[in-house]
Image: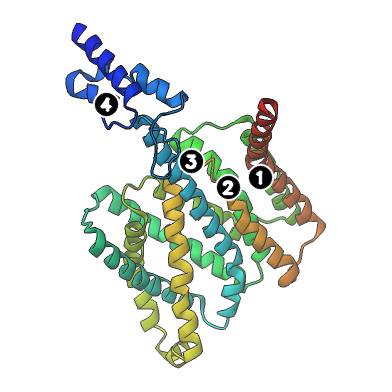
């Protein structure tokens, strides 16, 4: 114990006198068991006191203890994850326009091209990246099994989105995408023990009421919306459990789906002249870019962001799709659907937007009080 006190005293002096020193409190782990590891007073003081270290630009330079550096790295990953998800949902919101351009082709042909070209693009990027980084990590069997199931959940979701765009059900698809974020929060509670706030519980109630109202009024279950919710929730839950990087995971999913895609192409021999025309070839080739980049960004984002935190960003996609369905594609939107959508929008706002806006307002008020 005396040895530890002497060591901490010396380390305290070093932290205060030499804030740029690489000698920090984790050095204790070399000499003392885990239960004795702690931050010394010097490291604590360095968090709250101006530092005497001068950086290359001539300004003050505060050196953070290891735990703070780790926290900052985690925050950077979270920020990058949020940006990735934002880009993904913006692209997904605009996808009905893209699928309309391919409506003259069979859905299965578009799906097959989407899978094959996504595989080719991801394989090229993966090969270039691994050549530079020299990454050769192998996946565990559990991860491979997860990706196998996730691949077919993703494939089903893709088919539904293309079908909705080409059959005049963009608004119904947007309904499913509006419901998904709130159900994602519930999935976080159910599968990952993430807590639900009071706002999120109220929001979930509004969403359930809105969905029930639409079903009761129309006398049918909006199957496109329901299947979109279930397939995407399943994919999100499975992706959340992955340890391997997002690009490798998505590439593996495409490998699982490619045999089905090749089988579809060879069963469409009578349409090859149409499929492989210059215009259609370019459109089908672009499906790989349109698909692969957002999916890799999403897979990266979902691993670095809490499911509850990413909820409000997901409303970008259905909002864009809803606007396209009503004002561009002129789909039917009567008062019955409007009431149901209002309830769902209220749930989405209560569960995701309201808490974020409230926190921002509190931070602003605190800054005003300090000023």
| Disc 4 packing (10 Å; few <14; some 14–19; many ≥20) | some
User: How far apart are the alpha carbons under marks 1 and 2?
Assistant: 8 Å
- Label placed on residue 194: none
Residue depicted at x 63% and y 72% = 167
Q: Nearer the viewer, residue 43 or 137?
A: 43
- Label placed on residue 348: 1
Label 4 with label 3: CB-CB less than 8 Å = no
User: Is residue 121 visible in the rendered structure shown here?
Assistant: yes
Q: Nearer the viewer, residue 151 or 62?
A: 62
User: How far apart are the alpha carbons under marks 1 and 4?
Assistant: 44 Å
Which of pointers 3 and 1 indicates the residue nearer the eye? 3
Which of pointers 1 and 4 indicates the residue nearer the eye? 4
In the figure, is residue 287 to the left or right of 351?
A: left
User: How far apart are the alpha carbons under marks 2 and 4?
Assistant: 41 Å
Label 3 with label 2: CB-CB less than 8 Å = no
Regarding mark 3 in the picture, which secondary structure is present there?
loop
- Label placed on residue 181: 2
The residue singled out by tag 4 in the image is 26
1 or 4: tag closer to the N-terminus:
4
User: How far apart are the alpha carbons under marks 3 and 2?
Assistant: 12 Å
- 49 up-or-down from 350: above or below: above
Residue depicted at x 38% and y 33% = 53
Label 1 with label 2: CB-CB less than 8 Å = yes
> Residue 23, percent across and down?
26, 28
> Residue 212, percent across and down?
69, 46
The residue singled out by tag 3 in the image is 306
User: How far apart are the alpha carbons under marks 3 and 1?
Assistant: 17 Å
């Amino acid at each position: 114990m005396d040895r530890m006190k002497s060591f901490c005293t010396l380390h305290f002096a070093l932290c205060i006198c030499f804030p740029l020193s690489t000698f920090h409190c984790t050095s204790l782990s070399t000499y003392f068991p885990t239960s004795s590891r702690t931050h010394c007073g010097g490291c604590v003081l360095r968090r709250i006191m101006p530092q005497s270290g001068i950086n290359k630009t001539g300004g003050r330079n505060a050196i953070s203890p290891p735990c703070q550096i780790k926290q900052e790295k985690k925050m950077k990953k979270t920020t990058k994850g949020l940006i990735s998800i934002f880009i993904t949902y913006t692209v997904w919101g605009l996808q009905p326009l893209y699928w309309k351009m391919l409506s003259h082709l069979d859905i299965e042909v578009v799906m097959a091209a989407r899978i094959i070209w996504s595989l080719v693009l991801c394989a090229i990027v993966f090969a270039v990246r691994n050549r530079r980084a020299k990454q050769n990590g192998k996946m565990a069997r559990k991860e491979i099994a997860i990706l196998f199931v996730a691949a077919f959940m993703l494939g089903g979701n893709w088919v539904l989105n293309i079908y909705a765009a080409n059959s005049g059900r963009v608004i119904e698809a947007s309904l499913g995408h509006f419901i998904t974020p709130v159900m994602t929060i519930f999935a976080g509670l159910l599968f990952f023990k993430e807590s639900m706030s009071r706002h999120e519980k109220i929001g979930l109630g509004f969403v359930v009421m809105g969905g029930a109202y639409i079903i009761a009024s129309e006398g049918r279950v909006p199957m496109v919306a329901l299947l979109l919710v279930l397939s995407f929730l399943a994919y999100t839950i499975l992706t959340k459990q992955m340890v391997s990087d997002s690009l490798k995971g998505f590439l593996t999913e495409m490998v699982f789906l490619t045999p089905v895609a090749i089988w579809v192409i060879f069963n469409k021999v009578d349409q090859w002249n149409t499929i492989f025309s210059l215009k259609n070839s370019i459109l089908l080739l672009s499906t790989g870019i349109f698909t692969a980049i957002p999916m890799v960004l999403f897979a990266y984002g979902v691993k670095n962001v809490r499911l509850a935190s990413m909820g409000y960003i997901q409303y970008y996609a259905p909002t864009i799709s809803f606007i396209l369905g009503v004002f561009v594609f002129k789909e039917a939107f009567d008062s019955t659907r409007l009431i149901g959508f209002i309830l769902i929008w209220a749930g989405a706002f209560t569960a995701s937007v309201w808490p974020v806006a409230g926190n921002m307002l509190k931070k602003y008020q605190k800054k005003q009080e300090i000023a």
